[in-house]
Amino acid sequence: MHNERKITNDLYWVGVNDRRIALFENVYPVPGGISYNSYLLIDDKTVLFDTVDRCMSHQFFDNLEFILGERKLDYVVVNHMEPDHSANLSDLLLRYPEVKIIGNAKTFVFIKQFFNNDMESHFITVNDGDTLSTGKHNLKFIFAPMVHWPEVMVTFDETDGILFSADGFGGFGALNGNIFADEVDFDESHWENMRRYYTNIVGKYGVSVMSLLNKATSLNINYICPLHGKIWRKDIDKLVDKYKKWASYEPEEKGVTIVYGSIYGNTENAAEILAGILAEKGIRNIQMFDVSVTHPSYLVSSCFRYSNIVIASNTYNAGMFINMDAFMHDLAAHSLKNRYVSIIESGSWAPMSGKKIREILESMKDMKIIGDTVTITSAPKNKDYEKLEKLASDIMNSL
Ligand SMILES: Cc1cc2nc3c(=O)[nH]c(=O)nc-3n(C[C@H](O)[C@H](O)[C@H](O)COP(=O)(O)O)c2cc1C
Ligand SMILES: [Fe+2]
Ligand SMILES: [Fe+2]
């Protein structure tokens, strides 16, 4: 049975929600599920904007079939060729043999790589800035390379001011009936779904996202329709402001993310002591994570959010604690820049973790080390408390 929703008089959400999925991209925990959004425009011509992941094909085709009714599908625009949005292309062609596929030259390279059947006769290749009239609506194709993948483009419906933004402006979390951001109390849990999605999925490509944002400023946007998460038709400025911060690697607010790696709990103890001193000094935005317990995607998200980071790790076979090592590489791979970072290391015979942490930080851009590395031998003692107090003061001064 179909379960689409109406966005405007001519546009429908025909997407699906997946609440069974444990790991998005087989990496990121999505306890609230995820949506694969697909949109259908009914004009003189009918246009589908992207499809959905393979896991939910059946529901998607029910939605599509119902809205189309007796009409045929004229076009499918492939804004993003990643399989979570395009896996159903081949089935779509079987059901709608006359459909034309709109994409760019790179889109079609990927289509040929992913599918065995020959779709070439369906291709309509567009260039950056090309337009297509579907009757009442005028669609403009705007390239957004590396806003996740190199072939990514966004489509702007100039008639109604609707931006089909591909993975841009997306978020984790299934849509629970309410597909619009303004239909729910868009509290911090919703922003965290968007932040963790953005920072982990697109965070590395801030420069590309900025260039898309610059292109978008000249558009009169009434709606943003991403491929995952809520649709925006209010507070678009607020959303764009968040994106400008994330894309330019500016912290959203002053605060401290503390990530610790500890076997027996001693480095953890040092991190707790530091957090307590920071709190006594008046800092309220502190998030603490055990690197072995919380998935790194939450840690990456928190590091993007706040101005300061503290990394505390024991020494493990002359390096960082194994999970900290993975996390630090993950953080560097996301190209985070421009943060204040402080280091706590520990070890029983030859503490080395601080040096290793510093090496990774030095490979990243504009990461400023705040305070002296605090070295704990086996377990924190009174003398270490003073060092931690000094570190807390240095962190306060940097805020
Ligand atoms: C597998 C393993 C490897 C370790 N390698 C080192 C090392 O190379 N150098 C060192 O000084 N301590 C090493 N240690 C000791 C811990 O780093 C040290 O006891 C630390 O203070 C423990 O802190 P924690 O209680 O936070 O885990 C190792 C411990 C384990 C279990
Ligand atoms: Fe993607
Ligand atoms: Fe996606």
Image: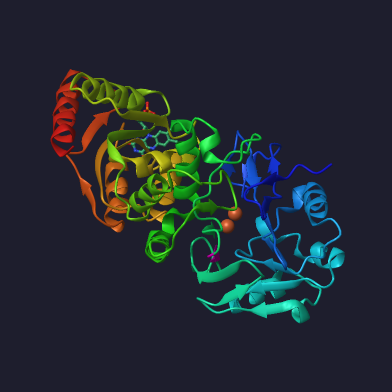
Q: Is residue 26 left or right of residue 383?
A: right
- Say above or below: 63 vs 138: above
Please state the horizontal and vertical placement of residue 141, each as a whole percent of the image.
Answer: 55, 71
Q: Any magenta on residue 155?
A: yes
**Which percent across, then down, holds residue 95?**
86, 63
The image quarter containing residue 3 is: top right
Q: Quadrant of the N terminus?
A: top right
- Residue numbers of the magenta segment: 153-158
Q: Is residue 30 above or below residue 66?
A: above
**Magenta stretch containing residue 243, yes or no?**
no
Relative to 156, is 391 above or below?
above
Q: Residue at x 70, y 54 (%)?
A: 52
- Which quadrant of the render holds ligand 1? top left
Counting from the top left corner in percent of width and height, residue 240 is at 40, 51
Left or right of 11: which side holds 356?
left
- Classify residue 322 as left or right of residue 336: right
Residue at 45% in and 38% down: 191
Residue 258 or 53: which is nearer the viewer?
53
Q: Quadrant of the C terminus?
A: top left
